[in-house]
Amino acid sequence: MQSPAPYTPSTKVRVVTAASLFDGHDAAINVMRRIIQATGCEVIHLGHNRSVREVVECAIQEDAQAIAMTSYQGGHVEYLTYMRQLLDERGAHHIRIFAGGGGTILPSEIEQLHTNGITRVYSPDDGRAMGLQGMINDLVQKSDYVTPVTDASSLHDRVRAKDPMAIAQAISCAERGEHDVIDFAKHVKRAPVLGITGTGGAGKSSLTDELVRRFLLDHTDKTIAVISVDPSKRKTGGALLGDRIRMNAVSDPRVYMRSFATREANVALNPHVRDAINILSYAEYDVIIVETAGIGQSDSQITELADVAMYVMTPEFGAATQLEKIDMIDYADVIALNKFDKRGALDALRDVRKQYQRSRQLFSQSIDEMPVYGTIASQFNDPGANTLYRVINDLLVKKCLLAWTSSYTVSNEMSEKIYIIPPDRIRYLAEIVENNKRYDAFVDEQADIARTLWKLRGAIEHLQQ
């Protein structure tokens, strides 16, 4: 069967992809979401082991047209039916649900799920008849519609009340150029904005999640919004908006998160991020974090939006002369040297601090006073991340004249990887096994030699007789 050409959507289709609760077989959804992305859609990928509530809240906050799920372990009828019920209860009747199960969903169950409001459950027979691209074309075509605004007349009241669906619809209106609908947020006083930028793979999303978690613990009466930008593919127009897969703290009633695709090539921000900041400021979020797409050496666009700008990098930047090419070192209020457990991290910390001092002509100050901090975002309660959070909190308080108090203390403790098994003992048991195997092989070899000699001795005695 010849694969059909990809369907070309007339609107920007946004699809949430995930594998259901306790479902570790996420290979299928990874294949599907890659094809969905290549068909020109913006894919918000959550990965596997996701509850119904997580998927539904994500789809509402992202103003997605569709949800695509895989399910292998059973319980799919209850899982998908509850998803439809939860979406309907929250007024998201328009969000469509697609699913597949590789043969574990029976034909009778497919019929039942269709009756329960699931848009389409693809069976192995569908795969054979339509092919992978054919199924994705069907999914995208059914999702190719403009998401509605539930009630435009009360949109401003619902945004002010921090209704996630209203905020999501208002941001989508901004992206579609419907500025008359969001005119209420035009002249609002902007909330404090923390801008986070850095190269791809530096751990921006993981570090953002750590900052959000600390903010929620430190300020129990405050709310926070996260705007995360990922690059669009120049070839297809699709985008993988995968920052949520790294963020666990955003699943909190006091947090709103919206993912953006740049929708342009070679830029780090979506042009409507400013509108989103105004809408979230109108909703009276206490602080807004804007995380940009992975950038090059010369991009410092985030400084035009942020009250406090942070640059995230790793110790593996190459020669020290490479630091002189990084424009953000000249503009960042604070620099996070993430993945501080990498080899040569201390030398890198000294080099970055020196370049920060040099770029600002701060030779009268000690190099240790430069706001460059080593962090290990993947490590729980990392002291470097604690210090970084407190420094950012204090910078926001100072620059935005806030009356915040923080319980986090700044310490001189350096980030250091904590190992369950020390590195020099990681292969300890393996070495014992290998040594035992070598001994067994030696014993077998010697036994063969002894056996051969015994046979030869017996043959000699037999001949002598």
Image (tube, rainbow, N blue to C red):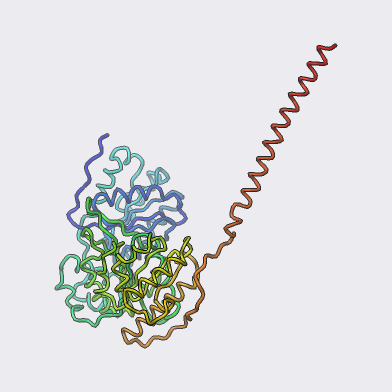
Q: Quadrant of residue 184?
A: bottom left
Name the outermost residue toward the front: 363
Q: Using residue 258 as the reference point, say whether residue 409 is left or right of it.
A: right
312, above or below 115, in the image: below
Residue name at image x 23 percent, y 52 percent = 40
Name the outermost residue toward the left: 180
List x then y, in percent, for residue 32.
33, 48
Q: Quadrant of the C terminus?
A: top right
List x then y, in percent, for residue 73.
46, 50
Q: Quadrant of residue 90?
A: bottom left
Q: Residue 437 versus residue 98: which sits nearer the camera? A: 437
Q: Quadrant of the N terminus?
A: top left
Q: Residue 453 versus residue 444: which sits nearer the camera? A: 453
Q: Using residue 1 as the reference point, say whether residue 215 is left or right of it.
A: right
Residue name at image x 55 percent, y 65 percent = 418
Q: Quadrant of residue 91?
A: bottom left
Q: Is residue 53 visible?
A: no
Give the number of marks: 0
Residue name at image x 33 percent, y 46 percent = 122
68, above or below 87, in the image: above
List x then y, in percent, for residue 101.
39, 47
Q: Is residue 439 visible?
A: yes
Q: Using residue 131 as the reference point, say whether residue 385 is left or right of it.
A: right
Residue name at image x 45 percent, y 69 percent = 375
List x then y, in percent, for residue 301.
25, 69
Q: Using residue 46 as the reference point, say whether residue 301 is left or right of it.
A: left
Q: Residue 276 versus residue 96: which sits nearer the camera? A: 276
